[in-house]
Image: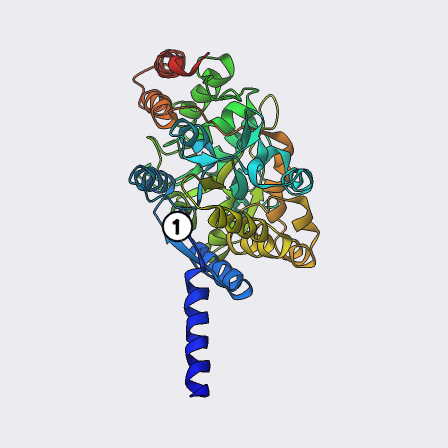
Amino acid sequence: MLRTFAASAALALGLSSAAQAVELEFYFPVAIGGPATQIIDELVADYMATTPGVKITAIYAGNYPDTLSRAITASRGGRPPQLAILDAPDLFTLLDEDLILPWDDFLSAEEMETWVGGFFPAFMQNSQTAGKTWGIPFQRSTPVIFWNKDAFAAAGLDPEVGPATWDEMVEMAKKLTLRDASGKVTQWGVRIPAQSVWLPSGLVAANGGEMSSEDGTQAYFNTPETIGAIDFLAALSRDHGVMEPGVLDWGATPRAFFDGQAAIIWTTTGNLTNIRKNAPFPFGVGMLPANVRRGAPTGGGNFYLFRGASDEQLAEAVKFVQWATAPEQAAKWSIATGYVAPRPEVWETEVMKDYVREVPGAVVARDQLQYTIRQFSTYDVLQVSKAFNDNVAAVIAGEKTAAQAMADAQATADAILAAYRK
């Protein structure tokens, strides 16, 4: 009898604990090659192992736009995630939809100073607006260049030194562009994907420009800096013959590099691990080439807290993100993927120091942060970006001049953003 009572009590206690368990849904975008999902699974499992009563379900929702769309749809349907990593430029869309909460409301003054204040300032440009912190940097990046050292050596170039300026890139790319006896190109000198605003904005930054305002209500397309950058992009094929014609595919760029189709590529530092594992040749990593200055956009994803969660869920979500961005976990994520560890303290850990000794190129994106501009971000960013991307494609196709195209893109952007200007 006593044994039966004890067993019943234990069962009741177990049911009570289960009822009080905190469950979180966490949306994560799978945007690059490499072991990203495996590492996220490991991080989630490690956290749950040390935090009894918490269950976190990581939901892999496709690329950044797919994940944003799923988060919006789920929220409108009354089943939002409690936490999601979304593209940093999605901030104003999330605010416009009234889907997210500021982290300030869940942190003490000390945590705001020591934790939020401990991220690289460059990454906070797309994380804060109107005096509030809306995103916490995690899967963050800058674009960098990778070059094939064997191709450099074969062209008579120093394989240890990549191009530092636009002019150097053009001259190197001319030597690196190879043709067979029939005149067909077998290796292009450089490859800059232009499907989205991100990599072209690296040219704009190097040309002395910005792409958008801090409050998300202004796009800067019809400026001398942007026009000059887009004309240079088109000229790589049109005038110099060193880049494959057309709007080059983002996702195919690492494979083009591995297969020797391009000797220099522009891509995210988040591809570093992918390239380390798959490039059949030694490679270099460098900052984006400068023109009037060095420059690059920041990129990547932030953690966002969603409305509709319980107080217990929000409190646990904050604890999980604080844990995930702490040095040990952030170092593990950075080493596994190539993304930039977003806090200086992470780089002071022994594991990161060992990694940098093995992979010196890992510090390139971090060191480039001092030259970065805010990643392009506005209200209705998908439509504003489309206006830019479509007009860049028209320049590359020879259908418009850069000046005409950027004037057209600006007119469309202004019409879209007028409603958001006070």
User: From the viewer's perspective, is residue 348 above or below residue 135?
Assistant: below
Q: Amino acid at mark 1?
A: Asp
Q: In this rendering, would 395 be left or right of 358?
A: left
Residue 167 vs residue 234, the one in the foreground:
234
Q: Quadrant of residue 187?
A: top left
208 displayed left or right of 65: right
| x, y percent for residue 231 | 43, 19
Picture coordinates of residue 258, whole percent (x, y): 42, 50
Crowd tier of the residue under label 1, counting other residues whose Cα lies within 10 Å: few below 14, some 14–19, many 20 or above: few
> Residue 128 appears in which quarter of the rendering?
top right
Tally of numbered tags: 1
Q: Is 394 placed left or right of 121 in the picture?
A: left
Q: Residue at x 52, y 51 (%)?
A: 316
From the image, tell me which residue sits under label 1.
259
**Residue 292 location, quadrant:** top right
Rendering coords of residue 253 (x, y %): 40, 43
Query: Could you tell me which residue is drawn at 38 percent across and 40 percent down?
Result: 64
Secondary element at tag 1? loop
Q: Residue placed at 32% from the left, 23% from the top?
A: 390
